[in-house]
Structure formats: structure tokens, C-alpha cells
Image (tube, rainbow, N blue to C red):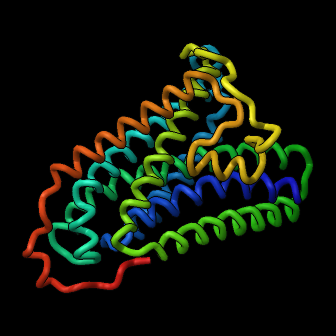
Amino acid sequence: MPGVALLVFREVMEAALIVSIVCAATRGVARRGLYVVGGIGLGLLGAMLVALGAGVIANLASGSGQELLNAGVLLAAVLMIGWHVVWMSRHARELAQHMGAVGQAVKAGSSSLTLLLAVVALAVLREGSEVVLFLYSMAMGGIGVAGLAGGIAFGVGGGALLGFALYFGLLRIPMKHFFGVTNLMMVLLAAGLASSAARFLLQANRLPAWGEQLWDTSWLLSNGSLAGKTLGTLVGYDASPAGIQLVFYAGTLLSLLIGMRWAGRHASPPARSLAPLGMQQPQH
């Protein structure tokens, strides 16, 4: 049971951290809870389908199907997060002043939420499919139902608690700084996902390495450790990255920062028509 609990915890933790950042970044936008729950549901369904077809997927593209699928999922998430942070840079002032209001802010926020639903679904799909495959192999190896159930319960519970801790920690940030902080976290998240996508493409021999190992800090913080996995999800930490990973990371980071700066300069002033609509309590 401890082995099952540890693996489930680490995979759930990665998905929970992404979901927490998405929830915090869409604070106050109407119906965001439905979008997040829908994304989790779609992700779980996709994870089961991917797990069922794992053998077929792995044999595609000369045996590189799984790596290419992982890379595609990650790059899709990067594009969707990128669109959101640029949009948010344009509308953050409006949302901060009219948090929870109906009207233009909610209408615009819903379009951004549609993409973030997909981000949640992709995160759950990637981590969930790994969990399903692992649990299937453990079941075939003879572990009992009680061991599997207990490990799943402890793993899911621990990962979810860590996600909630991050979410409620972000909610304590003053509103005038809130969207700036969450936007930065989304940018770092996207850069890290882009770096991971490059690693999968490198494993599939679809990209040049440009340096097999630029440095190695695994002696200090390994990728497999809890802290390493957490930093890997939040900021894209890799103990021994290849050069192409650094290119993807830096390229994504610079592109989004430039896009956010451009969007901020072209942001329209908050619509006065929203003011009379009143304030609602932010949705947690």
C-alpha cells in the first residue's frame, strides 16, 4: 500500500497544483466551478481511454506514440495558458475593480474559462492515465483490493490537500497584486510544460538535443523527490535538462511576457456600466 499511495500522491499532486493555479487565476468569474469540475471529469474519462489504448498508442510512430501524445497534450496546454494570460493582462484591471460582477467581465471571463477547462482536462488526463496504468500493473502483480483502495485513498487525499493549501494561500494575496501574481505563476507553469514537451519530443527523436545535459543538480534536488516534482510542476525545474528544453522554456517565457506587456499597453479602461451592477462575493 505505501508504494501505491506514494505514486498516486505524486501524480495527483501535479494535477492538483495546476488545477489550484487555474482556480485562483479565475477567482470571481461566474460559474468557474462548473468549468473546473467539467475539466476534471473530461480528464478522468480521457485518462481511462488512454490507459485502455496504451498498447496501441505506444506502438504508433515507430514506438514513439506515447512520447508524442504526451508532448502534444503539453503543448496544447501551453497554447491555452498563453492565450489566457495575454487576455488576463488586458482585462485584469477591469476584473479587479468589478470582481464577481455580471456583464462584460463575466462574458469575457467565460471565453477564457473555456480554454482553462481544457487545461484542467489535459492535466488530469496526463497524470490520470499514468495512475491508471500503474494501478493496473499493480493489480496484475497480485496486490490486494484493500491495498489498492487504501493507497488510492491516501494518495488522492494527500495530493488534493496540497492543492487546496496552494489555492487558499493564493487567495490571501491582496487583490491589487492578485492577478499579477497568478499571471506570473501561469507563465512559469506554461514554460515548464513547454520544457517537458521538448523532453518528450527529444525522447521520440523528433528534436535535436543541443546539449544532452547542460547541468546536473540531482545531487541537490532530484526530479523524483517531492520537492523536485513540486518545483517541476510550478516553475519547470529539471535537474538535468537538455539544451532544447532550455530553448523551449526561455522561448515560451519570453513570448508570454512580451504578449502580456503588449496586451497591458492596449488594455481598455474599465467599463463604467459595470459599476452599478454591484459586487458579489468572489467564488472560492
Q: Position of residue 266 (x, y in %)?
A: 15, 50
| Residue at the farthest left position | 273
Q: Residue at x 47, y 32 (%)?
A: 250
- Left or right of 150, for residue 232: left
Q: Classify residue 120 as left or right of residue 279.
A: right
* Along the line of sight, the residue nearer the viewer: 84 or 107: 84
Q: Residue at x 72, y 53 (%)?
A: 227
**In the image, residue 251 lies at what x, y percent?**
43, 30
Is 199 positioned to the left or the right of 31 in the image? Answer: right
Relative placement, left or right, of 36 versus 164 is left
Which quadrant holds residue 35? bottom left
Q: Which residue occupies 66% across, 57% down?
A: 12
Where is residue 79 drawn, in percent x and y? Answer: 38, 39
Where does the image place residue 238, in percent across and percent down from the top left? 66, 37
When the figure is inspected, residue 264 is found, relative to residue 78, above or below; the finding is below
Quadrant location of the N terminus in the rendered image: bottom right
Quadrant where the image shows the C terminus: bottom left
Q: Quadrant of residue 224?
A: top right
Which quadrant of the structure image shows residue 278? bottom left
| Foreground pick, 9 / 255 | 255
Residue that appears at 35% across and 36% down: 255
